[in-house]
Amino acid sequence: MAEDRLIINDNEYTFEPGETILQVAEKNGIRIPTLCYLKGASPTGACRICLVEVKGARALVTACSTPAASNMVIKTDSPRVIEARRFNLELLLSSGNHNCLVQGLDMDSWTDFQLKAMDAKEHKTLCPAYGDCRLQDLAVRYRVKMNRFPPAENQHPIETVNPFIVRDLSRCILCGRCVQACNEVQVNNAISFGYRGSEAKIVTKGDRALKDSDCVFCGECVQACPVGALITKDEMHSPGLDVDIKKVHTTCSYCGVGCQLYLHVKENKVVKVTGVENTGPNHGSLCVKGRFGYDFVNSPERLQKPLIKENGAFREASWDEALSLVTERLSRIKKESGPDSIFVLCSARITNEENYLAQKFTRAVIGTNNVDHCARL
Amino acid sequence: MTNPISDIEKADVILITGSNTTENHPVLSSYVKRAVSFKGAKLIVVDPRKIPITRFATLWLRQNVGTDVAWINGMMHVIVKEKLYDEEYVNTRTVGLDELKKTVQKYTPEYVEGISGIPKKQLIEAARIFAHAPAASILYAMGITQHISGTDNVKSLANLAMLCGNVGIEGGGVNPLRGQNNVQGACDMGGLPNVFTGYQRVDDLVIRERMEKAWGVERLPAKPGLTATLMMEKANAGDLKALYIIGENPMLSDPNLNHAQKSLENLDFLVVQDIFMTETARLADVVLPTASFAEKNGTFVNTERKVQRVRKAIDPPGSAREDWEIIVNLAGRMGYPMSYSDAEAIMAEIAAVTPSYCGINYGRLEYEGIHWPCPSTDHPGTPCLHVDQFSCGLGVFHAIDYIPPAEMTNNEYPLYLTTGRILYHYHTGTMTMKTHGLNELAPNSFVEISREDAETYKISNGSRLKIASRRGEIEAEARISEQAVAGTVFIPFHYAEGAANVLTNAALDPVANIPEYKVCAVKVSKAA
Ligand code: SF4
Ligand code: SF4
Ligand code: FES
């Protein structure tokens, strides 16, 4: 066997030096479940869901952080692997208020747990991540039961004192994806692991609320969080299991970076924005404006009808009336004062197609080159 | 940008000047922060304010506002004197070095320190770091262009990059960061008074004839039109009668707002097409409601020249129409029928008349955008410009001398004012100020002022200030900040109340006609 080959599930594959087992597997279409692994950041090996069996190794290894080596013989779904993943999932589920899918608890402890979990006023409804939760997905896939570890007491209060992000650390599984996203992807260095042992918690400097910290509300952590521990405020108000939401891939309309984003749409309203992960320039990242500044689209102040000013005040008009008036006035001014007495200001905000037509209109219809936009301003 | 955004992480040295990157181009700034934190790149920041990205910098040079040509020439002086430039590159790919050498001769570090205030040791160190880098990337934004010497500033940065062989290589380049989502596209599409799409000149007979044929018109005008900034002058003088504004709000973004208002009121006819009743729309005779980006199909071009899709997610409110539909409606009524089934059909026409867009169509943009120039449908696009040679042959050095800003401080107006944006708002705020949370984080206009100046003028943090220039006065809240350097204050221009552009100077760069937003002289006092 050549130097740079290994075997996964009885098939041979090649790899590049430096690649992890996970990367080799993904390249070849073999799916290994992950939870804490964040693309673009260094692997932490925190969740131990990506465990695989390597022939000759005593313990199972984490695929996300173990480098591929030549002649490795790897099993990604052996019974031992499956059992270990299930065990780890049970540990994670029992670590907090994961009251969505708990199976296997006897009636009394089930009721106790539900009551305790729903104690907080923010927990009266379904978990906002319901239906869009990596932990829940995996729990279903691995048919996890909850009777091995009784649910832990989780005392973290819910933080809502900022305009955009709800931090519900009672549902945090300490996977560290948010920390990676903040420190290694956006490099805002606002959050990290704090305290030790059972006190462990994701904290800002000095364990302050986000709004009093270095946080700039890019929301990278919210997008990275696999569970319902970090969610947007808007999601908290319209929680979980939304099957009518459609996602539309488009380009951010603020700055010139041109981040690729999904508009999450429900009933003709934008309800959430997320970054598109598999493509540049942003690879899933967004800033506070791109991610949270979408209310203007649905604003009641949007103009809905053409307006004509009469005696100093606007009145509503039909398109036909408004367009006739514009046509008539522009034509007359063109005739009386010449095409160069008219100017069209197109825009850095509208599309290429619209700018193209605006300059074509100015040149071919009005007959002047008086067209510009405010790029300079 | 000459180089793609992803190249930033491949640079050995990054020079940022006139760009408050973390606040104005946040996602791009993470490329810089990652390059420095994880890839060993060195960052040099040259900016009048101690902006947040300086936290990642090896060196922060603080220049006096409006003295950019001086420090750039100063760096080149050091590089020439110490023979640190890329000799082979300069010899084979550029012309004009001798002239440049002559001009930068007098810009000794001592001389530059006198003008710019940058300590000579720092300047020399920056020059050495920059010149020694195998690949150095220059990033700049409006802090470089919004000056009477804006064009000179840009050319000077290009000189510096070429001198060190940094144009046309991976991780290098001269990279302007565009402030608005589709500035690049508006320019590419011929939304400029002197060119058609793809920068084809209107005063070129051959090009004009080709466009006449494509558009089916007899004669297209040959004389370049007015720029937006001169347009205001002409309106004020009464030479301009009608203005059709599509999606712009010059009543908040124009320099010298008092003058802008008079100019617009002086028009016989003003049409404004927008999604909101903006300050500008209020002055209009007719207002036409349009669709927002979420309500239409089309494309934007980002700062790295990448053409990317915009897709319709929802229906526009009420009877609002897409901008292109409205233009088609008007053209038809004015005797020039246009017919397009959709935005895609318009792009097909753009590709047909624009060499650099020839290979672009919606099918190819489905999953990812394409960097123009893209001359044919089998061309992959051009992420990096000028790779083997400059698009115009040899790279030309421009020998440029420093000229001081149009307005200097004096006894009456002792402080410099510079303007810009903040993280939580965008441009004139028509969009961001509809999001309650953004207003909560950044509710109102403010004057950022240094501790020293605050002491001099007996100003306490949070107090109301009156700020006046020769053109007008506004009130805003004082914010004492470590970011400010004594002698210069900063005001964001987003807010209609406390609008910075009441104060700014409309003095123009003679070539690009960009107003000098970044420098004017003001005085501050406590508000009554
Ligand atoms: S908040 Fe979310 S992303 Fe962060 S550690 Fe907890 S579960 Fe993971
Ligand atoms: S998300 Fe932020 S950085 Fe990205 S394009 Fe929008 S405004 Fe720019
Ligand atoms: S995904 Fe590998 S340890 Fe979490």
Image (tube, helix red, strand yellow):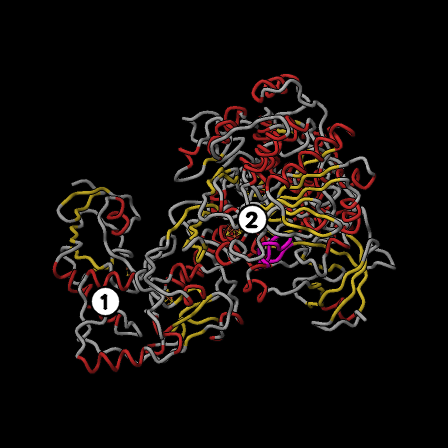
Which is nearer the N-term, disc 1 or disc 2? 1
State the SS at label 1.
helix
Q: Residue A147, located in which quarter of the rendered image? A: bottom left
| Location of residue A166 in the rendering, given as x and y in whole percent from the top left corner | 44, 69
Where does the N terminus of chain B fall, quadrant-wise? Answer: top right
Whether residue B3 can be seen here: yes
Mark 1 to mark 2 CA distance (whole Å): 41 Å
Q: Which residue is labeled 1 in the image?
A: A89
Whether residue B106 can be seen here: no
| Location of residue B407 in the rendering, given as x and y in whole percent from the top left corner | 81, 49
At horizontal 16% and vertical 59% (from top left) the residue drawn is A57
- Left or right of B418 on screen, residue B164: left
Position of residue B234 relative to residue A89, above or below, is above
Q: In the image, is the residue at mark 2 within 8 Å of ligand 2 by its beta carbon?
A: yes
Query: Alpha-carbon neighbours of circle 1 within 10 Å: few (<14), some, or many (≥20)?
Result: many
Q: Which residue is labeled 2 in the image?
A: A255
Magenta stretch?
B421-433
Q: Nearer the viewer, residue B477 or B325?
A: B325
Q: Tag 2, which chain?
A: A
- Left or right of A118 on screen, residue B212: right
Q: Main secondary structure of the magenta part?
A: loop
At horizontal 49% and vertical 37% (from top left) the residue drawn is B307
Position of residue A213 relative to residue B312, above or below, is below
Quarter of the rendered structure image containing ligand 1: bottom left
| Location of residue B113 in the rendering, given as x and y in whole percent from the top left corner | 75, 51
State the SS at label 2.
loop
Q: Amino acid at mark 1?
A: Leu
Position of residue A23 relative to residue B305, above or below, is below
Q: Amino acid at mark 2?
A: Cys
